[in-house]
Amino acid sequence: MDPSEPTSFNHRALKLSTGHTYHFVDQLPADYESATTTNLVLIHGFPDFWYGWRYQIKPLVDRGYRVIVPDMLGYGGTDKPVDPVEYSYSKLSNDLVALLDALDIPKAVFIGHDWGSLTAQRVVLFHPDRVLALAILAVAYWPPSRVYVPLEEFVKQEPSWGYMLYFASDQSTKDIDSNPRRFFDTVYRTPGSQDTSIVKGGGMQAAITGEASKEGREHLFNEQVMAYYLENFKSMHGPLNYYRTTKYRYEEEKDLPVSPPPDLPVLFIGGSKDPTSLPSLVDHAKSYVPQLESEMFDDSHWLMIGESKDAVTERIATWLEQI
């Protein structure tokens, strides 16, 4: 399991009972026992795929865990439905539980980043009997809404997530598919070269289409990693569909509990330089999850691959030992 060699990981694909075929990495520890080994499901966000967890997989396997890392729906080697309705949290949760069923796993620890964080949260609410514990990175717990809030209104309340409006538009698919390298250069930036204006208003579109200056930006990928991402992202339509599900998600979630079970261990890890990990959002999460443990690292949104990657892995491992 060499992070610089994607083929060194154990790749699998299965057609699930939900009808979707998922590609995933499945790593078993040396002392694996199906009855006693704890299973971890690592869920990536946008715009990522299994490879975003490359630095965490081996260290966690070496500590005795089975680590399962799917390409989520719309990504990599997994099915890519065209209709946004297929990307609602209930359907994604059903897919992940179906993956557990296919692997004969009764319960697992779910660990998510970005959209993977939100998806993992909803697995807990839709299928609480299948979750041992929950760790969420970058995006803190967000409860189901009891009233429908259009994306436009949500962005007014949380301007740091303004880029969502652009990603929800059809234009974003055309822009990014025409400028994939510039898109990844824009999104995967080092903390010191982040421009907070990009996440608001039309800043993201300007950065992707070339209307904004690239001067002073540094991204987190070397050329080998960039090539592998570009190879796995032939079109952004599937990944962008996650941003087009606001109404579907509301209809499916409006009757769910607003909090996870009170005895469920929950960990949040954020980056102090990440606008999606604002202290106010963490405080909001704690009002719904009193048992929430939280830790902030001096890093960006991409803390699993940045300077904090080893510290993040260690924090997760320490938490796992305590649950």
Image: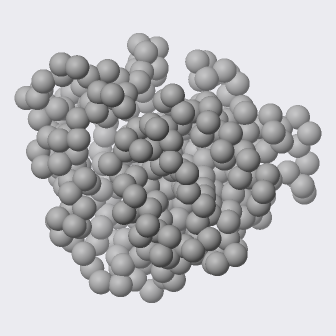
Snapshot quadrant of residue 219? top left
Please state the horizontal and vertical placement of residue 210, each as a whole percent of the image: 12, 26
As drawn, 23 above or below 35: above
Snapshot quadrant of residue 230? top left
Identity of the residue drawn at 49% across and 30% down: 306
**Along the line of sight, which residue is nearer the eye, 11 or 165?**
165
Question: Is the C terminus in the top left, top right, bottom left or bottom right quadrant?
Answer: bottom right
**Along the line of sight, which residue is nearer the eye, 71 or 208?**
208
Identity of the residue drawn at 70% across and 75% down: 263
Residue 16 appears in the figure: no
Please state the horizontal and vertical placement of residue 68, each as a whole percent of the image: 67, 45
As drawn, 179 above or below 160: above
Identity of the residue drawn at 35% across and 84% down: 146
Q: Is residue 36 left or right of residue 22?
A: right
Q: How many marks?
A: 0
Question: Is the N terminus in the top left, top right, bottom left or bottom right quadrant?
Answer: top right
The extreme left residue here reads 211
What scheme was used to colour the molecule? one colour
Please state the horizontal and vertical placement of residue 48, each as a whole percent of the image: 44, 38
Identity of the residue drawn at 41% across and 44% down: 272
Please state the horizontal and vertical placement of residue 30, each as a whole percent of the image: 88, 34
As drawn, 23 above or below 145: above
Residue 278 appears in the figure: yes
